[in-house]
Amino acid sequence: MAVAVYQGERFITAQLMSILPQLRDHDEVIIVDDASTDSTRSLISALQDSRLIVVPKAENEGILHGFETALFRCSGEIIFLSDSDDVWLPKKVETVLEAFAHDDDLMLVASDAILIDADGKKIGDSFYAQRGKFRAGLFSNLLIGKFHGCTMAFRSALLRSVLPFPPGRRAHQDTWIGCVNALLGGKTKYIPEPLVAYRRHSSNDTGLKKNSNYVRLKMRLPIVLGLLRLWVGGGSHRARSS
C-alpha cells in the first residue's frame, strides 16, 4: 500500500487505525513523509506496527513524487493508494481483494466514497454523485479525471508501465495510473459501494476547487506526453530508482 503525507499530524493516526485492522500480517504500508515539520513521524512510530514503513524526504517534493517514491518500494501483488487524511470503511480491503480474486483479467478496481468534513462528520453520501459518473475510458479521463486515488487499487504488474510518473508536479497520480491502464487495455471494475470516507477540508490538495480550462490543460499535458512516450515505446517504461 502506498501513502504520501505532509504535515499529517491531525489525521494520520485515525487514517492508519482504519487501515491496519484490515491488513494481514505480511502486508506493508509504505508511507513517504514529504519533509513534514510537525509530529507526523512520531505519531506513526507510536503505533508500533512493523507493517508501517516510513520513507522520509529531506526536502518537500510534492504529492506526485511522494506517491511515485512509495510505489517504487511497494512489493505486494495488489497495491492500494491512500491519502493521509481519509478513513477506510470496514471491509474495504476484503471487498477489493475479492474482486481481484474472482477475475484474473482485472487490473484496476475503483469504488465510490462517502464525504466527511475535517471533524469526521458525514457531508455527502457519494463522491461520484457530486463528481459525475465514474468512467474508465482514456479520453473521458483526459477531459475530466474520474479516477480518485483513495478509492483505487491495482495489480503490481501495472507498475512496469506507470513508473516513473510524468515529470513535474502538475499531473495527478490517479489520473495518470487510470489513463495508462486504459491505454494498455487493462480491465477496470467500478464498485458503486462507498469503501472510503473521503475527507474534504481546507488543506486538501485536490477536490475543493474547480480548475480553469487553462490549468486543467497544463495538468493534462504531462500525462498526454507520457502516454505518447508509452505508446511509442511499446507499452512499458524503464523503471528507475527514486
Image (cartoon, rainbow, N blue to C red):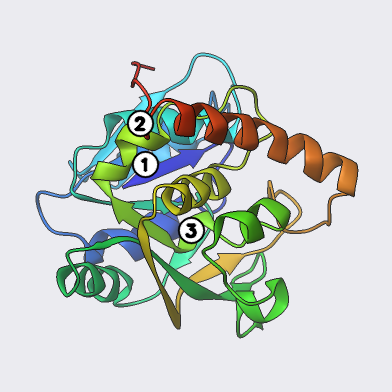
The x, y position of residue 20, in whole percent, is 26, 58
Residue 140 shown left or right of residue 179 in the figure = right
Q: Nearer the viewer, residue 5 or 132?
A: 132
Question: Which comes before the other along the chain, label 2 or label 3?
Answer: 3
Eyeballing the image, is 167 above or below 90?
Answer: above
Q: What number is the disc on residue 88?
A: none
Q: Nearer the viewer, residue 116 or 100?
A: 100
Eyeballing the image, is 52 above or below 56?
Answer: below
Q: Which residue is mark 1?
A: 44
Disc 2, disc 1: CB below 8 Å? no
Residue 62 figure quarter: top right
Q: What number is the disc on residue 236?
A: 2
**Residue type indicated by callout 2:** Ser
Helix, strand or loop at disc 1? Answer: helix
Q: Who's the residue at 78% across and 35% down the image? A: 218
Question: Which of label 2 and label 3 is nearer to you?
Answer: 2
Question: Which comes before the other along the chain, label 2 or label 1?
Answer: 1
Q: Who's the residue at 47% across and 20% down the image? A: 57
Helix, strand or loop at disc 2? Answer: loop
Q: Who's the residue at 61% across and 85% down the image? A: 125
Picture quarter with the C terminus: top left
**Residue type indicated by callout 3:** Cys
How packed is label 1: few (under 14 Cα within 10 Å), some, or many (20 or more)? some
The x, y position of residue 135, in whole percent, is 57, 69
Q: Nearer the viewer, residue 50 or 57?
A: 57
Residue 218 shown left or right of residue 142 in the figure = right
User: Quick check: can you spot residue 43?
Assistant: yes
Question: Which comes before the other along the chain, label 3 or label 1?
Answer: 1
